[in-house]
Image: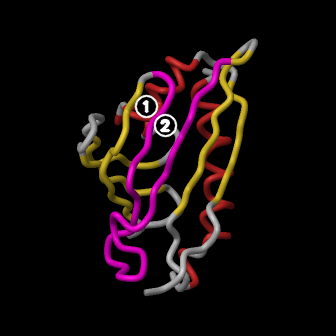
């Protein structure tokens, strides 16, 4: 069994209430505004999602919601279709939302990276992409 990589942790301030930000994490039409094309997302514990990120054709992520606690926390399994080294269900994404003066602090932790994930799916690549997408989320939720 391969060893796990260190988790990715990101934090961003979003100038919107936690209830608004939470909707952008679970409602397909709002998710599509910041993350990509959502093919389906059943926002309930055990519900499945499938989405195609905007960074390239053929990069489709799937997973299962493992925790939904509106408007404070969401967690889901995560992996890539068609890649045995980072298959769906391989990793875990946990997001916490905390109210702050004029908005929300979002904390993201992505853990469970396998040691050898290939050049496309390294922890560094995921860290960079999460930073990019969280910035897009902040912009979308602020409109």
Instruction: Specify the label residue 93 is tagged with.
Output: none
Query: Pointer 2: residues within 10 angstroms few (<14), some, or many (20+)?
Result: some
> Is residue 91 placed above or below 115 in the rendered structure?
above
Q: What element carries label 1?
A: helix
The quadrant holding residue 98 is: top right
Instruction: Specify the label residue 30 is tagged with.
Output: 1
Where is residue 9? Give x, y as percent: 67, 52
Q: Tell how many labels.
A: 2
Where is residue 79? Give x, y as percent: 39, 65
Instruction: Specify the label residue 33 is tagged with.
Output: 2
Where is residue 133? Give x, y as percent: 60, 48
Magenta residues? 71-99
Residue found 54% across the figure and 81% down from its top: 3
- Of residues 52 and 87, the one nearer the viewer is 87
- Of residues 38 and 16, the one nearer the viewer is 16
Please say whether residue 12 is one of the residues in the magenta stretch: no
- Of residues 30 and 93, the one nearer the viewer is 93
């Amino acid at each position: 069994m391969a060893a796990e990589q260190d988790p990715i942790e990101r934090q961003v301030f979003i100038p919107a209430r936690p209830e608004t930000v939470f909707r952008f994490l679970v409602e397909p039409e709002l998710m599509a505004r910041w993350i990509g094309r959502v093919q389906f997302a059943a926002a309930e514990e055990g519900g499945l999602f499938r989405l195609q990120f905007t960074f390239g054709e053929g990069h489709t992520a799937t997973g299962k919601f493992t925790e939904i606690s509106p408007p404070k926390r969401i967690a889901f399994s995560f992996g890539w279709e068609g890649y045995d080294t980072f298959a769906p269900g391989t990793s875990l994404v946990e997001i916490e939302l905390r109210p702050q003066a004029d908005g929300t602090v979002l904390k993201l932790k992505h853990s469970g990276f396998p040691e050898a994930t290939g050049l496309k799916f390294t922890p560094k690549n995921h860290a960079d992409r999460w930073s990019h997408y969280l910035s897009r989320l902040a912009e979308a939720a602020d409109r």
